[in-house]
Amino acid sequence: MIESTTPLRIALPPTANIDAILRERLRAEPGAVLAEVRRDRAWEPVTVAEFNDKVVAVAKGLVALGVEPGDTVGIMSRTRYEWTLLDFAAWAAGAVPVPIYETSSAEQVRWILSNSGVSLLVVETAANAATVAEARDGAPMCREVLVLDGPAGSGAVEVLTTAGAGVADAEIERRRRLATLDDLATIIYTSGTTGRPKGAELTHGNFATLALNTVADVPEVFNGQGRTMLFLPLAHVFARFIEVVAVAGGSVLGHSPDIKTLTLDLRAFRPTYVLGVPRVFEKVYNAAEQSSAAEKARGYFNWATAVAIAYSRALDTPRGPSLWLRFQHVFADGLVYSKLRDTLGGKVTHAVSGGGPLGERLGHFFRGVGLNILEGYGLTETTAPTSVNRPGRTRIGSVGPMMPGCSARIADDGEILLKGPHVFRGYHGNPQATAEAFDGEWFRTGDLGVLDDGYLRITGRKKELIITAGGKNVAPAVLEDRVRAHALVSQCVVVGDNRPFIGALLTIDPDGLAGWLTMHGKPRVTVEQALADPDVIASLDKAVARANEAVSKAESIRKFTVLPGDFTIENGYLTPSMKVKRALVLADFADDVDRLYAAGRDRQAALTR
């Protein structure tokens, strides 16, 4: 078996925990800005000392309301400053915060509350509280529900601060030192593409060891001068990890809870690095392309795109970019690239991308623009990153070398196995699932990949591997990610298990459609009307053809159909972390799949329903 290991940079004492990271910041630089909070239109700084005072005050409130060391405290909210405050307050009180997506249904909430034994729950809105009310019958341990956006003076933070006024400082000081590296820090429930979500138990050691080693390993980003805005859900491990890393690395934290105001927030906050998923960067590119078309400058944009990609590719050659290419790059920067960077605040130099393959074209484009996207790989069970590209050590198309202390092994069947201090200790209350997840000391990821000189590349998902009637093994992710990069496409589900060839189900992105129509000088129409436009179908056909260039003929998409609606969290086809529930899609759209393979149907007939 092929293996790769990156040595640990910093070994922590057994008594360390996440709270110690905040206490060290407090000791070293109490007056430094830890976060900025949006109040109306201004961003107000919160120093380390001020944040710590608020953490202690809220932790006292948890104690006053009966939260004991080791108790679970739920948080159900969008990404906002109060989430970070509650996380650190729970850890200061010796408790275990349990995140819940604010989009969760009553059934999902009931399962998480009952399975984790949440004793106190903080929700964002009255609507969240109403959802919880439907679930309380199955969660007798949950004795208290507080609302962040309650009436004046009765919000969760105010209630906790008032309740804890009589708790002694000494009690919080005692509790802040109770947890050790091996103790439970949080239970994060996996998205659950099939069946009930499993609660991954992550320890203080998982977070603290990985966070401090990340800061030491990537000083170009975590240098005490950084700024980052969290807009991905803090209910997901990715944003949660960056929250801790930002405190450890001296970054100023900002939060943006509403995607509708994200562009305005980014421009006002001006982060130096951001984290996102590939879909975010795809939308940034598509929006820039569509904007150039609206300004009658599409030709300039296409030229600037080609220059950016060529410039980035040349950076990987011994001689680097030629003098002529450098001249074009400078000209394109003033014309196109600087405007694109301005949409992200103007100061962003790095981004961390995870959750799926970014694709080489986008990776080279953004690096050429001046935004180095450090593509990485990880799971809930690995406390987010297990590998990531580093500044100066980047291979676009890969997910980088292992993080410090992390090891990867490729099993005989191609599955990626992982080991290290970042790997979770098991699934909460589910010893059978825990046992099945490990091969000795190695965690079975379920993902397929290859190691090339220590750099990991993801090739697919083991359970999603398609075997055609002709016996061809096809990993759908390669095709799906490339098709989904098209401005018109929201989702792509590749099919073909036990079928004579590969097909695909597509959905249209309504926002992308509006931009595409503008870009092509067409009037606004509905998705249904657009599917009758031969130009739309031809553009989708080209997207599929471009995706097919990445695979052999036997693996290529021969036919596709466009579904009338999109997959969303609300209609149940996407998980809260935006993963497609493949099994449900295949079951509910079985007739559409069958029509792809109906005898005598030509390609054009299969394009739409």
Image: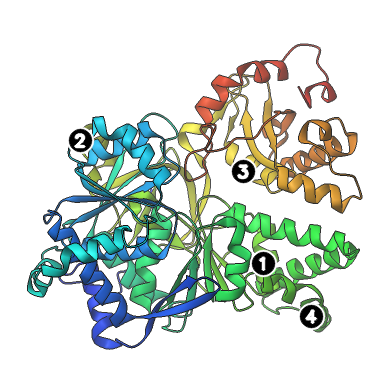
226 w.r.t. 487: above or below? below
Alpha carbon separation for disc pair 2 and 4: 58 Å
- Looking at the rendered structure, the kind of residue marked 2 is Pro
The answer to which quarter of the image holds residue 203 is: bottom left
What residue sits right under mark 3 in the picture? 478
Q: Where is residue 276 shown, x and y percent of the image?
A: 54, 59
Alpha carbon separation for disc pair 4 and 1: 15 Å
Front position among marks 3 and 2:
2
- Mark 1 falls on what kind of element? helix
What residue sits right under mark 1 in the picture? 366
Q: Are marks 4 and 1 in contact (CB under 8 Å)?
A: no
Alpha carbon separation for disc pair 1 and 3: 20 Å
Q: Where is residue 608 shown, x and y percent of the image?
A: 78, 25
- Looking at the rendered structure, the kind of residue marked 1 is Phe
- Looking at the rendered structure, the kind of residue marked 4 is Gly
Q: Where is residue 217 shown, x and y percent of the image?
A: 39, 75
